[in-house]
Image (tube, rainbow, N blue to C red):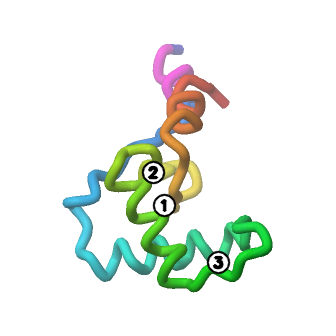
């Protein structure tokens, strides 16, 4: 019975930035930007500027790289959203 309960929990893990090669991190950020679309208002922000913004948020800890065992994917989430997600069960 206990093992069934464990299977129902979401497995989300923060990936430390230093564990990824720079090129891999860059590719993850680029993919994230493309999926998220543009939420930068009327001003035209270059792709490099968006990458720098996301990288800055990751380095400051306001955003985190998260691996989802359920979806077998990596995503970037605001830190407070990650905390909420880890407490939820399926």
Between marks 3 and 1, how big is the CA–CA gap?
14 Å
Vertical comparison of 9 with 37: above or below? above
Q: Real-space Cα distance between discs 2 and 1?
A: 6 Å
Give the quarter of the image for residue 61: top left
The image quadrant of residue 23 is bottom left
Q: Position of residue 57 (x, y in %)?
A: 43, 54
Q: Which residue is mark 2?
A: 66
Marked residue nearer the N-terminal end (2 or 3) = 3
In the rendered image, which residue does mark 1 sit on?
74
Residue for badge 3 = 34
Residue in front for this viewpoint, 54 or 75: 54
Q: Earlier in the sequence, mark 3 or mark 1?
A: 3
Q: Residue at x 26, y 67 (%)?
A: 20
Residue for point 49% across, 25% down? 6
Q: Residue at x 48, y 49 (%)?
A: 69
The local crowd at label 1, few if under 14, some if 14 to 19, many if 20 or more residues have their Cα within 10 Å, is: some
Q: Earlier in the sequence, mark 2 or mark 1?
A: 2
């Amino acid at each position: 019975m206990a093992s069934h309960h464990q299977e129902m929990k979401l497995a989300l893990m923060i990936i430390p930035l230093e564990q990824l090669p720079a090129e891999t991190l860059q590719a993850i950020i680029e993919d994230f930007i493309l999926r998220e679309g543009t939420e930068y208002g009327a001003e035209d922000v270059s792709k490099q500027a968006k990458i720098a913004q996301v990288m800055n948020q990751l380095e400051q800890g306001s955003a985190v790289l998260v691996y989802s065992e359920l979806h077998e994917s990596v995503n970037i989430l605001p830190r407070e959203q990650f905390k909420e997600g880890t407490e939820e069960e399926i």
